Image: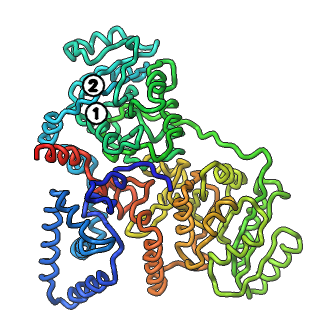
Amino acid sequence: MPKGCDFSKEIVCPLMSRFNQFEITSPLRMPTQLQHFAILQIKLLREYGLLGRLKALVSRILKLSISFLNTRPTLKALILCSTEKIGAGDYIFELYERLSALTEPTLSQAENEQNLSYSQWSAKFDSPSAEILSELEATTDYSRTFIIARFEQASEQYAEELALRLVANVGQLWQAVFLFSAECKAGNTIQNILHRINADTRISFTLPKALPETEFIVFIEGGALPRPHALRIFTEALRLLPSATMAYSDEDQFNREEAPSNPWLKPQFSPLLARQGLLLGRMLAFRGGVKGSRALLRQLADINAEARAIAINYAIEMGEDRVLHIPHVLYHDALPARPFPIRVSLPEKLPFVSIIIPTRDRWDLLGPCLESIKRTEWPAERLEIIVIDNGSTDSICLTMLEKAADEQLIRVIRDDFGFNWSRLNNLATLNSRGSLLLFLNNDTKVLDELWLKKMAVHAFQPDTGAVGCKLLYPDGSVQHGGVITGIQHAAVHAHSHLDSSEGGYRDLAITTREVLAVTGACLAVTRENYEAVGGFNEGFQTVFNDIVFCLDLHTLGKRNVYVADPLLMHFESKSRGHDDTPEKLAHSQAEVQRVCRLHPKLMQSDPFYSPNLSNWTPYNLSLAPRRRVIWDYIRQQSDSIDC
């Protein structure tokens, strides 16, 4: 599976090597049968008005215990690691979270997250206190760090402020060179900087003849304004993960008249976001002394070179498991991003495609679906449509299926067994010829004649797994914008009900990118990748079969992709119905449990969704970020040295 490093899951204390989350307040595992029993009894007691105070007392004791342990990571680690896999420690902490959910309704939690301002969130969850900053200064990192800051005409205005912020950074030894493009009025800027920093010799304005040997390289593009702890956290993060060769962090937007706003709380390494210039940002750290680092230093120091492209290419070359995401806002960005277009192409000879559509009766849905496919821009001789008929009895539907088959518009496969979405698609695939498989619901309608090309071009890229696209409701709002796992202990569609052209959080709804999963309502995958995971898991008959399929692909190291163009309309669940009855809801909940047993880590923590964002309401700020702050590691190491 892709291993883009993220402090929400990769860095662990030696005593906590079995655990992936740092704060006990985040969900650890799905509850055991014993937990279900205990929680049920508490709910029943509350409903009958008995022993309510006892529940509150237990919740209070657990809350105080967990708060105490969160301030003592070594003791917490000892308690957690004293049990195997799912033990007493996990049980207590999971039970506390469930108890808390009874005390504070989830709707209230969502409301609190909605009302939390970014300034409040940053102060509480993402800013070291003055005391901690003093400790960072007192434990200065003496490793050599060389900073390259580059400015163009638009960013020159921020050079002076950058110099002041570097001088104010704590706990790190560094040397910096400020480089200006030919369009800049560098003379005046340099004089102003020298005056403001009292000619601090750590900042120079010409490259040395021989570039220095350095343990760390920090690149700053004009417009990035680091926070006081930024340098120390960047270098400390690389030190904590020796396998990583570069690091990027979260960021927010800067305006001289207002407080920082609009945080970009980023995912783990996403090659598609990186290639578009939307991920890495204007401040990066690289490990020196490794293969390619000297050449990288020379390239970044070339004022005529495109620095962002250099950094992106270096990240792609290094590979996902050597690119580290630091889930802290370490700098403010004063300039708007300049995205790059994605450049991908189809094979010269278009592959043969099999479109597979399960159906039962409902020609009123299937007929318009097939009619819309006729407009697809794809050679007819390179395309087949297979309708897998799951026991239709409606005479109109049977007549129309026969007619379409006689006209060689479709091929019909009959299956009269009970409905099992996975089995139906697997059966149709066995009888298909395409090197690209396109699984499509019968309650969809093509909106863009280029839809198949726009999906196929990604499906045939190296390391790509499943490909989905933006699907719209009949009213034009978004039905599917990719899938996020870990939300409400399950999985949800991202960006639901946004207007089709609306960007959503940081424009992710209109950005083609990697996601953990896509819906099976319209899913493209190469036959090779389909066969690599053994097709769809037939144990999941109605729901979560597409999620399991995508998670299986991700586990093999494949990248699932969301195409941001609105390519189809989806009349969601028109044929099967919604999961809105008690029986269907219970079945869905049971299926969630099964998915979590198959993919516990991925269902708990989506690598393409920030640990700083809510796991209740998508893209809200989290009231309990699912990561440990890095300055705690520094303090812990300092305490160990003092001992």
Q: Residues within 10 Å of mark 1 (few under 14, many from 20)?
A: many
Q: Residue at x 50, y 43 (%)?
A: 319
Which numbered disc covers residue 231? 1
Amino acid type indicated by mark 1: Leu
- Judge by depth and name the residue closer to the eye, 500 or 632: 632
- Judge by depth and name the residue closer to the eye, 538 or 556: 556
Q: Residue 521 falls in which quadrant of the image? A: bottom right
Q: Of helix, strand and loop, which one carries label 2?
A: loop
- Judge by depth and name the residue closer to the eye, 379 or 59: 59
- Residue 602, percent across and down? 44, 63
Q: Residues within 10 Å of mark 2 (few under 14, many from 20)?
A: many
Q: Reading the chain from its start, which is encountered first: label 1 or label 2?
A: 2
Give the distance between the C-alpha atoms of the residues marked 1 and 2, in whole angstroms: 9 Å
Q: Is residue 428 above or below residue 119?
A: below
- Residue 20, percent across and down? 34, 60
Q: Which residue is mark 2?
A: 174
Q: Is residue 257 left or right of residue 136?
A: right
Q: Of helix, strand and loop, which one carries label 1?
A: helix
